[in-house]
Amino acid sequence: MNAVKQFSKPEGFLGRLAGRLMAFKNRKRGKWAMELLELKPTLDILEIGFGSGRELGRIAESVASGKILGLDHSHVMRQQAEGRNRKLVKSGRMNLKTADVGSLLSEISDRNLDRVYAINSWQFWPDQTKAILDIKTMLKPGGMALIVFQARGKDANDAASRAGAVKLKDQMEKAGFKEISVYEKDLSPTIAVAVRGVA
Ligand SMILES: C[S@@+](CC[C@H](N)C(=O)[O-])C[C@H]1O[C@@H](n2cnc3c(N)ncnc32)[C@H](O)[C@@H]1O
């Protein structure tokens, strides 16, 4: 099994290892995403492609009473994220699902969410246009979507991250998002980009 596969759909022992690596290596990117989400105590939030679950745990520090939902198609990542957030899962405040983003609307019934976000997961989605439209359907009017992308792999460079932002912005515009903003963060090995829109 190749290395990219362990980040697009972590499985088995190597997948568990990839999850631990994500939790350790992606801290700065995750922290930046949390700032862009403008968290408040009562928000209902969904993360798509939660990986190790570290960011979901961080959310709980700022969101005292809202729902914290997650969807990731990797069973191994769900186990790891639930292990990392045991108390929140046990209390019922955090609810994680194993499913492909393509079944978002059937897996999660909420249509009134305040925030939906994804961090370096979008590039793996089989139908990005549909997923971005589905995200808009799940948000309440005025709710916010945030998609973060950082080009990775041996040919990754800043231009590839920026090209991702252009594509994402176009997908959000076509889905009908308003007030779309693009952000950049200087990170290694390439910049990260974030595209934020209001439903
Ligand atoms: C590179 S990891 C990033 C994890 C985490 N967001 C982070 O920044 O550390 C990508 C995550 O997205 C998930 N993922 C990729 N494609 C997906 C899909 N089509 N549906 C649901 N989850 C997906 C993977 O299983 C993996 O956990």
Image: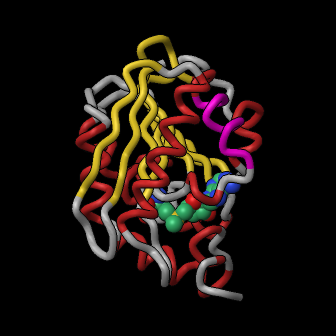
Q: Is residue 91 visible?
A: no
Q: Is residue 42 left or right of residue 19?
A: left
Magenta region includes residue 132: yes
Q: Main secondary structure of the magenta part?
A: helix
Q: Is residue 133 above or below residue 34?
A: above
- Residue 154 on image: x %, y %: 48, 84
Q: Is residue 146 above or below residue 23?
A: above
Instruction: Name the quadrant containing residue 161.
Output: bottom left
Instruction: Name the quadrant containing residue 186.
Output: bottom left
Q: Nearer the viewer, residue 111 or 129?
A: 129
- Residue 111 on image: x %, y %: 60, 19
Magenta region includes residue 87: no
- Residue 124 on image: x %, y %: 63, 59
Q: Nearer the viewer, residue 161 or 43?
A: 161
Q: Residue at x 25, y 62 (%)?
A: 28
Q: Residue at x 39, y 27 (%)?
A: 180
Quarter in which the N terminus is drawn = bottom right
**What segment carries the magenta color?**
127-135
- Residue 67 on image: x %, y %: 46, 31
Q: Is residue 126 above or below residue 64?
A: below
Ligand 1 position by quadrant: bottom right
